[in-house]
Image: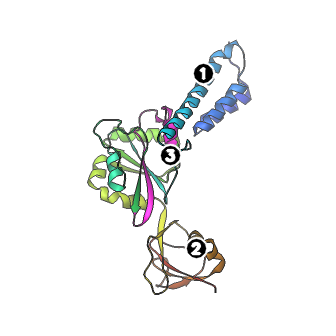
């Protein structure tokens, strides 16, 4: 007997197929279950929908348990610093080693596969700018469908950059394929295991250049620039800098003097709309 699904079911099925998160897939499945025909010929379809719903609910419960064991809230790891970067790759590609080299992490490093079963976290200090770096457990086939896949994907989705480590072309293609399934719109850097190992000192610079951020220093007249610098998005203005330092700066703003590549000469006087560049040094002046 044919299913003979109506337009409401077809629309719900399309919503499910376009979903990019476990929550969206669950919502789509529930709509499919609600709008699916209820007769002898649809029993198999209904059973499949219920099975998929049960699997997502089970995955969500496992995510909560993982977060609980790690001493974090079920919502996941709190995003800290100027940005979050995730290191991903197949097993034994050197993810833990790279994390340890570029951050303060004490991640367990082993030659045995699948040593990392939960996210490892470190902090990269790039010239005073703090960047959170998270190592994601090994990427495998149908990663998002694994017990904790949706939890790990959510961490990646909230990141500003992904670093993909691989040993060979097969591993690189695997990760690329899995990223397409996850439908992530996150910038990616690909590094071979050998490159990451031999030139790990260059990785922090590569991370910074791909984060879409700039660092700006502030100073008082006739004094050295202050440290650490302030991180801002590319295209940020004096207004953005003043707001980040203190909300009152914008209201009391008089003018600013800038030293760096964004001005024609050192100490040029500018207004709130002036666009800053990386490594600019700024003096802010306020009204009396």
Pointers 2 and 1 in contact (CB under 8 A)? no
Q: Nearer the viewer, residue 150 or 125?
A: 125
Kindly indicate the quadrant of the structure image that contains residue 139: top left
Disc 3 marks which residue? 155
How far apart are the two marked residues, 1 and 3, measured between alpha carbons?
29 Å
Q: Secondary structure at mark 2?
A: helix
The answer to whether residue 262 is visible is yes
Q: How many numbered marks does the figure carry?
A: 3
Q: What percent of the width, then of the height, locates residue 48?
A: 60, 21
Image quarter where the N terminus lies is top right
Q: Residues within 10 Å of mark 2 (few under 14, many from 20)?
A: some
- Say whether residue 72 is magenta: no
Q: Earlier in the sequence, mark 1 or mark 3?
A: 1
Kindly indicate the quadrant of the structure image that contains residue 74: top right
Image quarter where the C terminus lies is bottom right
Q: Earlier in the sequence, mark 2 or mark 3?
A: 3
Q: Nearer the viewer, mark 1 or mark 3?
A: 3
Q: Which mark is residue 242?
A: 2
Q: Residues within 10 Å of mark 1 (few under 14, many from 20)?
A: few
How far apart are the two marked residues, 2 and 1, measured between alpha carbons?
56 Å
Q: Nearer the viewer, residue 214 or 175?
A: 214
What residue lies at 50% left-to-right and 42% top-to-bottom? Answer: 153
Q: In this rendering, would 182 be left or right of 248?
A: left
Pointers 2 and 3 in contact (CB under 8 A)? no
Q: What percent of the width, then of the height, locates residue 154?
A: 53, 43
How far apart are the two marked residues, 2 and 3, measured between alpha carbons?
30 Å
Q: In this rendering, would 46 be left or right of 110?
A: right
Q: Which residues are magenta?
A: 126-153
Q: Is residue 146 above or below residue 43?
A: below
What residue lies at 38% left-to-right and 42% top-to-bottom? Answer: 89
Kindly indicate the quadrant of the structure image that contains residue 24: top right
Disc 1 marks which residue? 48
């Amino acid at each position: 007997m044919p299913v003979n699904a109506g337009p409401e079911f077809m629309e719900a099925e399309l919503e499910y197929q376009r979903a990019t998160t476990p929550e969206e897939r669950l919502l789509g499945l529930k709509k499919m279950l609600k709008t699916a025909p209820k007769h002898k010929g649809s029993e198999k379809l209904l059973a499949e929908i219920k099975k998929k719903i049960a699997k997502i609910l089970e995955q969500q419960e496992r995510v909560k348990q993982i977060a609980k064991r790690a001493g974090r809230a079920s919502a996941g790891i709190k995003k800290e610093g100027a940005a979050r970067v995730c290191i991903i790759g197949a097993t034994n590609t050197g993810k833990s080693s790279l994390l340890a080299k570029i951050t303060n992490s004490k991640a367990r490093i082993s030659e045995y596969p699948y040593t990392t079963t939960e996210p490892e976290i470190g902090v990269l200090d790039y010239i005073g700018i703090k960047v959170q770096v998270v190592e994601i457990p090994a990427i495998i086939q149908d990663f998002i469908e694994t017990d904790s896949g949706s939890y790990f994907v959510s961490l990646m989705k909230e990141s500003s950059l992904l670093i993909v480590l691989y040993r060979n072309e097969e591993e690189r293609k695997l990760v690329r394929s899995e990223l397409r399934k996850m439908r992530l719109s996150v910038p990616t850097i690909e590094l071979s295991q050998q490159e990451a190992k031999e030139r790990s000192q260059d990785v922090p610079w590569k991370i910074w250049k791909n984060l879409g951020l700039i660092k700006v220093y502030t100073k008082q007249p006739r004094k050295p620039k202050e440290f650490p610098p302030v991180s801002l998005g590319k295209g940020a203005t004096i207004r953005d800098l003043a707001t980040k330092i203190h909300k009152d700066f914008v209201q009391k703003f008089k003018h600013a003097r800038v030293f760096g590549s964004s001005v024609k000469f050192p100490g040029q006087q500018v207004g709130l709309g002036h666009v800053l560049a990386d490594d600019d040094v700024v003096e802010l002046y306020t009204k009396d």
